[in-house]
Amino acid sequence: MAPKFVKPTTGPLGDFDGFDLEASYQMVPVGESRFMSVVTDAQGGTLRVGNPQFVSLKAVRSNKVFQGSPTPTLVNLPADSTTTFEIFGDTSGRTTLILEDSSGKPVDPPLIVSIKMPFRKSVNFCFLADIRRSSSFDPIDVPKIFSRVKRTFLVQSNVVLDEQKRGGFNVNVPKDLGNPMNPELSPVFKAVVDATPTEAFMSDFIVYLCWNLVAPGKDIGGVAFQGTTICFCEDDGRGSGGFFASAVMAHELGHLMGLDHFQHANGGLMNKADISSSRLFQFEIDTVNPT
């Protein structure tokens, strides 16, 4: 068996950190580290940094004795070993980590490493009400929901989401918007936007927190208007303690950051029918944070 990269477990199931096994890709924030390991066979091998300008290897450890001390750019991998290390992001850019077998032949594919600067986006929350009903979100719960959304994007893509106005805005629409409400109907959408305080539009994104939503032919948890700054999220009654509310909010914000639905057998944040995890894939990470 030639040397190969193996991602160490970094946390509970669903705690992703910008690693995409299928694309052999790892996002690393500038000034931070991500963990990785390499396993070898009886022949050992070598680990090299493709371009030392961008990353360095730190805290290199192995269950076998090294032949020669590891450096920040080169590690001689002992035979039949597991070597763990941190990939430290020195400056923004892209490089590779290259594995070579005992003969010096590169082992494909290399690990793509993208070192990203913080990419900041602001959010305003609008608690929606009409003449018959009001948002079913408890204002106390929203910071808890948003904290999980923030972590989803920060850890995986170094996108930093912040609330522009703490506590959000109350948006009172002087008409009946319907229950369930369909914001994709032009009169409904216009009525909501017209009732929204001008200050709310100072953020990059607006999240309307409402009641039961519907779209043509299906019940949904949220609606995003790609190409705009606006999305809607409903509360399904499971409160802030569950996965659903934060997953839906992150999913809709993902649309506003340019992501389309991406159906994957192992789940992902942008799955269309069922959001079974908060995972982002390489092309999604590079879309929401192009740094």
Image (cartoon, grey):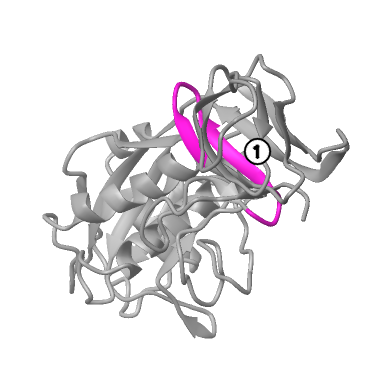
The foreground one among 126 and 156 is 156
Label 1 sits on a secondary structure element that is loop
Which image quadrant: the C terminus? top right
Q: Position of residue 232 (x, y in %)?
A: 38, 60
The foreground one among 256 and 155 is 155
Above or below, 43 against 131 in this view is above
Q: Is residue 286 shown to the viewer in this render?
A: yes
Above or below, 238 against 262 in this view is below
Residue found at x 20% / y 66%: 241
Extreme residue in the bottom direction: 217
Residue found at x 45% / y 54%: 9
Asked if the stretch drawn in magenta spans residue 114, the answer is: no
Residue named by callout 1: 78
Above or below, 289 against 72 in this view is below
Q: Which residue range is magenta in the image?
A: 21-35
Extreme residue in the top direction: 53
Tally of numbered discs: 1
Asked if the stretch drawn in magenta spans residue 34, the answer is: yes
